[in-house]
Image (cartoon, coloured by chain):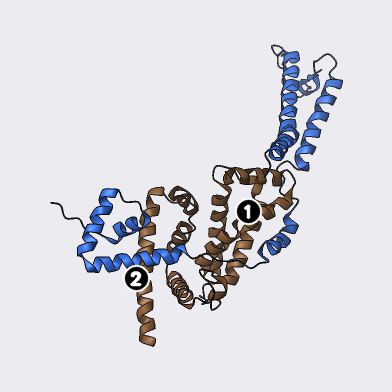
Amino acid sequence: MDHINDDIIVDRILGGEEELYKILIDKYKRFAFTLAYNILNNSEEAEEAAQDSFIKAFRALAKFNRQAKFSTWLYRIVSNTAITYGRRNKVKKEDIELAKNISTAPAQNLEKQDQQRFLHQGLSRLGEQDRLVISLFYLKELSLEEIAGIMDIKASLVKVKLHRARKRLANQMQLLLREEALNL
Amino acid sequence: MEKFEVTDEILFDYIDGTLSPGQKERVDGVCEKDEKLRKRLAELQKLDLMLSQTTGTPSPTFTDTAWRRLQPAAGRTSKYGFNSLFLLLGVVITVIIGSLYIPDGVVEMDLAWVFEPTENYIKTPEIDLTQGIDLKVLTQGMLFSLVILALLFLDKALLRPYFKKRRAMISGL
């Protein structure tokens, strides 16, 4: 149903009602930001990359061929934009403002915030493709086929890549915990 | 009985809920006996939970900022902009002019000046190039193609966007 609504909004935007694009921005900004954040591990860059993605999508709206959902098409743009940003800024920056931007639980829940910090440190140690497949899968919005479409790989490979990426992440998390314990 | 090896991949499938009930039961059975595996499953489940809870919150001004940045791009999205209208207008004018200047539906083609032999050229037998070509059919065919083109542009530039917009308005957002 949402997919149909998106198509109607896109039609109306193309028909001249450009203000309606704000509806699409509002609807997908959280997912776009989360995806960009998981790839870039920096909230400011993620915000900029997500906004750039919306601008790129708007400019290319007439070329959107409706074979995929608008959201799938948008996430593909977000992924590519965030990856390009990441490559441009190769020096990894630790995001010390993580707790401010990642809302996983009540703000006072320090344990969860710590968990998220570890998680993002772990994610930052993974390769681009690993981070991307995990981020797309945990948006909980996309089917494996849609993820395959975004990543430009075969659908049968998504699960394999996802399992490998999660395994690597689990190992990195263990390493991080060990390092943390040694620093205490 | 065949040994059932529980790998990390199977544990992820277990967590994702993509195992069959039979396989799930077997994993439960193995985990019950194997403490190390039980611990690994708990670790992976925790990781899965953490990943599921990761939802970023963009700044409250995200939409407005993006929209502000978009403004120079706005006005260039329409699939059926002025270019299509100009094209349509051009085709219509061509058809009108064509119809006015060809009253009998036949183009007068005087090709004599092209093929007029001069003294310097070797004389060749006179050939009427227009012989065998029905110019009336050719002209009418060209006009017909132009009309079809004009109708196609009319459909693409005006009718389709108009009806799409109407359908969208009727369906609501």
Marks 1 and 2, Cα distance to the nearest angstrom?
Answer: 36 Å
| Residue found 31% across the figure and 51% down from its top | B19
Q: Residues within 10 Å of mark 2 (few under 14, many from 20)?
A: few
User: Is residue A13 left or right of B58 when viewed as pictured?
Assistant: right
Q: Secondary structure at mark 2?
A: helix
Q: Quadrant of residue B89?
A: top right
Q: Which chain is painted in blue?
A: B
Say whether disc 1 or disc 2 marks the residue closer to the N-terminus. Answer: 1
Q: Residue at label 1?
A: A57
Q: Is residue A37 left or right of residue B116?
A: left
Residue type at mark 2 is Asn
- Relative to B127, say whether B89 is above or below: below
Residue A154: image location, x then y, percent: 41, 49
Of B12 and A148, the residue lying toward us = B12
Question: Label 2: chain?
Answer: A
Residue positioned 75% across, 28% down in the render? B150
* Residue A79 in view, yes or no: yes
Give the letter of the brown chain. Answer: A
Q: B26 left or right of A110?
A: left
Determine which of the numbered discs, if any, sits on residue A171 in the image.
2
